[in-house]
Amino acid sequence: MLYILDILGTFVFAVSGAFRAVKYELDILGVLVLSIATGVGGGIVRDVMIGYNPPAAFRDETYLLTCFAGGLIVFLAARKIAPRWDIVIALDALGLGVFAAIGAAKASLFGMGTIGIIMMAAITATGGGVIRDVLVREIPAVLKTDFYAMAAMIGGACLAVVKHFGYGEHTQMLCAAAATLTLRLLAMKFRISLPKVKSLTMSPSELTRQRKTVKEEQQKRTESGTQ
């Protein structure tokens, strides 16, 4: 069952990557590249980081074929899929939960600590999207919008907590996936996002120069007042 959900998540992520290619009117190669990068990019980065070589995407070519299928379907039927984007987004949330759980479980299997587990959950779930955005020269969406990467990180933390209390691997992964999925759906429903930093009125160097100028003027007034 988990394997089927993993393949489904890969497919949905590949579809979302392919639609980014549609946005920029890329050719079929561009569509396939973005679909593959989004579908398996996070898992490949995770496996390389933990020393699992060759990565799972190359051990089981079903993942790559699934990405190809997602890209081709979007290339041929983007106009029919777009009006049903709400369904794609809901399935994307499911894929996020599954990917976060798999990433966290793999990190745990390789003996990583709590921080490592959380990081691998986030990288697995969002790494493909980051690669996709970089390829089209966008700021990665996980850094500026939505409660997305944080949901995956909390899911990874849940796995670490459940593991600490001695529960089995399946229970750990179920809790991680459920927590990530629930948080993501709630964030979508209530439009929850992380606080954003406010832009500065000037560059740091200009603000520093302004502060020094004001300070110098105050010193001059003080000196003139004492004379």
Image (spheres, rainbow, N blue to C red):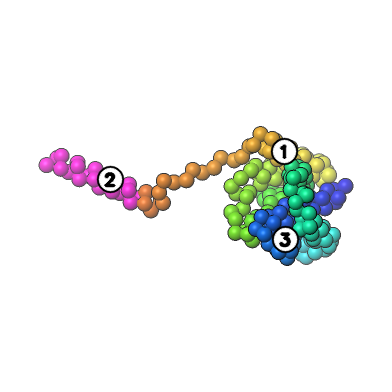
- Does 121 sit left or right of 136 as displayed? right
- Label 1 sits on residue: 185
Q: Main secondary structure of the magenta part?
A: helix
Task: Choose the circle earlier in sequence order: 3 or 2.
Answer: 3
| Residue at x-position 77% and y-position 62% | 55
Task: Choose the circle earlier in sequence order: 3 or 1.
Answer: 3
Amino acid carrying mark 2 in the image: Lys
- Residue 226 belongs to the span the image colors magenta: yes
- Does 193 sit left or right of 74 as displayed? left
Question: Looking at this rendering, what residue extends furthest in the front direction?
Answer: 79
Amino acid carrying mark 1 in the image: Leu
What's the distance in space between the residues labelled 3 and 1, CA to CA? 27 Å
- In the rendered picture of this protein, how many numbered marks are placed on residues? 3
To which quarter of the image does residue 193 belong?
top right
C-beta proximity under 8 Å, tags 2 and 1: no
| Quadrant location of the C terminus in the rendered image | top left
| Mark number, residue 31 | 3
- Residue 185, can we see it? yes
Q: Give, as a single range, the part of the protein colored magenta.
A: 208-227
Amino acid carrying mark 3 in the image: Val
- Label 2 sits on residue: 215
Between circles 3 and 1, the one closer to the viewer is 3
Helix, strand or loop under label 2: helix
Say which of 175 and 11 sits in front.
Answer: 11
To which quarter of the image does residue 83 belong?
top right
Question: Looking at this rendering, what residue extends furthest in the top direction?
Answer: 190
